[in-house]
């Protein structure tokens, strides 16, 4: 088993996907950045609120009860992941979303 798989909860399929992405990225002079997926489908991309109930799995919709923003839940996830990648490129070593402590 590759070293990257031994200590993590990564499936073989995910590992293969990562290898493939890295290969394709390098062909295009790009890098693959790994970020935490935590809250990426629960965070409103407009106001930043993190709330699990804002996501409706069955309708594949995210509807923010704080600011009213609506979008496809996978799109919300992709936008949040992109934001974490941007933070990584800006110098944050382990960018991630966290719940506000006073929420
Ligand atoms: Zn919002």
Image: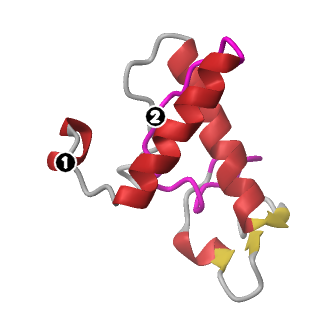
11 relative to 99 in the view: left or right: left
Q: CA distance from mark 1 to mark 2?
A: 20 Å
Please name the colour scheme applied to the rendered image.
secondary structure
Task: Tell me, yes or no, whether the highlighted magenta stretch contains residue 62.
Answer: no
- 71 and 4: which one is in front? 4
Looking at the image, residue 69 lies above or below residue 24? below
In the displayed structure, 16 sits above or below 92; it is below
* Highlighted magenta segment, given as a residue range: 28-48
Q: Quadrant of residue 85?
A: top right
Q: Earlier in the sequence, mark 1 or mark 2?
A: 1
Residue at point 44%, 54% (across, down): 14
Disc 2 residue: CB within 8 Å of ligand 1:
no
Query: x and y percent of residue 1 in the render?
Result: 19, 48
Q: Secondary structure at mark 2?
A: loop
Instruction: From this view, report whether residue 16 is shown above or below residue 57.
Output: above
Residue depicted at x 55% and y 66%: 51
**Label 2 belongs to which residue?**
34
Residue 55 visible in the current orientation = yes
Of residues 51 and 95, the one nearer the viewer is 95
Circle 1/circle 2 CB separation < 8 Å: no
- Name the residue tied to disc 1: 1
Q: Secondary structure at mark 1?
A: loop
User: Dot 2, crowdedness within 10 Å: few (<14), some or many (≥20)?
Assistant: few
Q: Residue 45 lies in magenta, yes or no?
A: yes
Q: Nearer the viewer, mark 1 or mark 2?
A: 1
What residue is shown at x 67% (from left), y 11% (from top)? 29
């Amino acid at each position: 088993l590759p070293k990257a798989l031994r200590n993590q909860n990564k499936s073989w399929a995910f590992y293969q996907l990562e290898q493939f992405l890295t290969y394709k990225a390098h062909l295009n002079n790009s890098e693959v950045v790994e970020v935490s997926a935590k809250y990426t489908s629960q965070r409103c991309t407009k106001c930043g609120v993190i709330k699990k109930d804002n996501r409706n799995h069955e309708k594949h919709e995210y509807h923010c009860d704080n600011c009213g923003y609506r979008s496809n839940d996978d799109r919300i996830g992709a936008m949040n992941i992109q934001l974490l990648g941007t933070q990584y490129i800006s110098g944050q070593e382990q960018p991630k979303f966290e719940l506000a402590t006073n929420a």
